[in-house]
Image (cartoon, grey):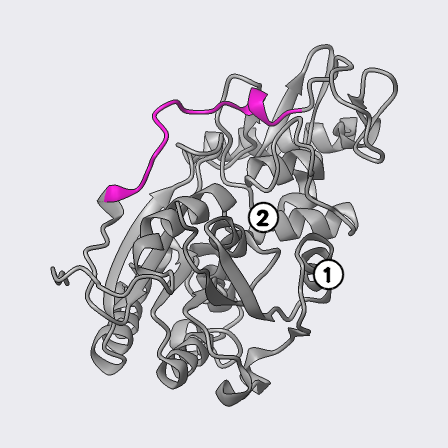
Amino acid sequence: MQNKPGFTFIDLFAGIGGLRVGFEDIGGTCVFTSEWNKFSQQTYRENYECDHDIAGDITEVAESDIPAHDVLLAGFPCQPFSIAGVSKKNSLGRAHGFLDETQGTLFFDVARIIRHHRPKAFLLENVKNLVSHDKGKTFEVILKVLQEDLGYQVHWRILDAKPWLPQHRERIFMVGFRDPSNFSFDDLNIPTERPTLSSILHPEDGSETAEAPFTEGAEARVAAKYTLTDGLWQYLQNYAAKHKAKGNGFGFGLVDGSNTARTLSARYYKDGSEILIAQKGKNPRRLTPRECARLMGFDRAGSNRPFVIPVSDTQAYKQFGNAVAAPVARAIAECMEPWLHNAVAIRPQKSVG
């Protein structure tokens, strides 16, 4: 069987490459990367082969300076649209959505690049609250730009990472094609067996090699620094009790290997409260950054090529909390594949909206 010629893609607002993973796995070659955070750039360089510099602020990059490409990937910043981001901006008296000059308008940088290069396809990712932001007006504008102004066939869906990873993580994915296709999110290969946290936690029984600073000793037990101090654990229990008395659900998430975790967020470095791992006879602990890498699908327990984590724990938690779940991106890439490879000369004639 003759191999299909590959395709090229660009990785905008790349983070640590969650979208890139999926498209490299189906034969794509990245020809341009943009990521403004220097720590994310460091992690990105350590994990992917890049024969190009990583651009910083995309607003300062002319579309003509970006190489031609078949696919555009963009996990454009979600803070202007997320519930937490909107609440924070409201409390500070700042605008959000498209009125936010520093982040909300970054979608239009995606649009100007699509308009200039006319790639075969794109995949955009954001928080699910994008759909309801400003009573749906924000998402309405985005779809209008992509469909009417740019002329792309657009499909979108909110997907939860739970079938692929032991984490409840809902994000919106928007797929666009320049030419007609019969792509459908209904054709995604979704696993039927749901994973649990036992698949990503350190076994602590000597079956894996110790990896400092995350694990130590002959049994590769999780380092003591990840166990909550008495003071922090008491604070979290008091905080949860206070909010429970008020009738709301704020509090920590205590789980074990048989569970699915809450959404890993960029604030995990603060107290780890959304995902605490129960421990017999002692306070619960946070996930280690290596477990976060597994929880986001960047590597698996026992992998021969673990994801390189060259930054501090604080930066690693931020990076994984902001990342795209890699297996979800891979599943979407596989579904898009028939319309991406340069070998595809005859496209399906069926056109769907």
In terms of secondary structure, where does tag 2 sit?
helix
Percent position of residue 57, x then y: 61, 78
The magenta-colored residue range is: 187-201
- Image position of 91 with respect to 316: above or below: below
Amino acid under label 1?
Phe
Magenta stretch, overall SS: loop
Residue 176's x, y, as percent? 30, 65
In the displayed structure, 289 sits above or below 21; it is: above
Q: Where is residue 140 in the image (x, y as percent from the top left)?
A: 24, 70
What residue did someone put label 1 on? Answer: 39
Task: Work out whether residue 93 or residue 203 is closer to the camera in this orientation and state it.
Answer: 203
Q: Which numbered disc, 2 or 1, marks the residue that appears first in the sequence?
A: 1
| Crowd tier of the residue under label 1, counting other residues whose Cα lies within 10 Å: few below 14, some 14–19, many 20 or above | some
Q: Name the residue under label 2.
A: 321
Marks 2 and 1 sit apart, C-alpha to C-alpha, by 14 Å
Q: Which residue does the image show at 66% across and 31% down from the upper left? A: 303
Q: Which residue is drawn at 57% across and 36% down?
A: 295
Q: In which quarter of the image is the N terminus?
A: top left
Q: Give the image location of residue 196, x and y in percent.
A: 50, 23
Quadrant location of the C terminus in the rendered image: bottom left
Is residue 189 inside the magenta stretch? yes
Label drawn at residue 259: none
- Of residues 16 and 87, the one nearer the viewer is 16
304 with respect to 247 (left or right)? right
Q: Is residue 46 magenta?
A: no
Q: Which of marks 2 and 1 is in front?
A: 1
Examine the image and state in which quarter residue 280 appears: top right
Q: Can residue 35 be seen in this view?
A: yes
Question: Quick one: which residue is furthest to the front in this view?
Answer: 1
User: From the viewer's perspective, is 32 left or right of 228?
Assistant: left
The amino acid sitting under disc 2 is: Gly
Look at the numbered disc 1 and give the secondary structure of its residue: helix
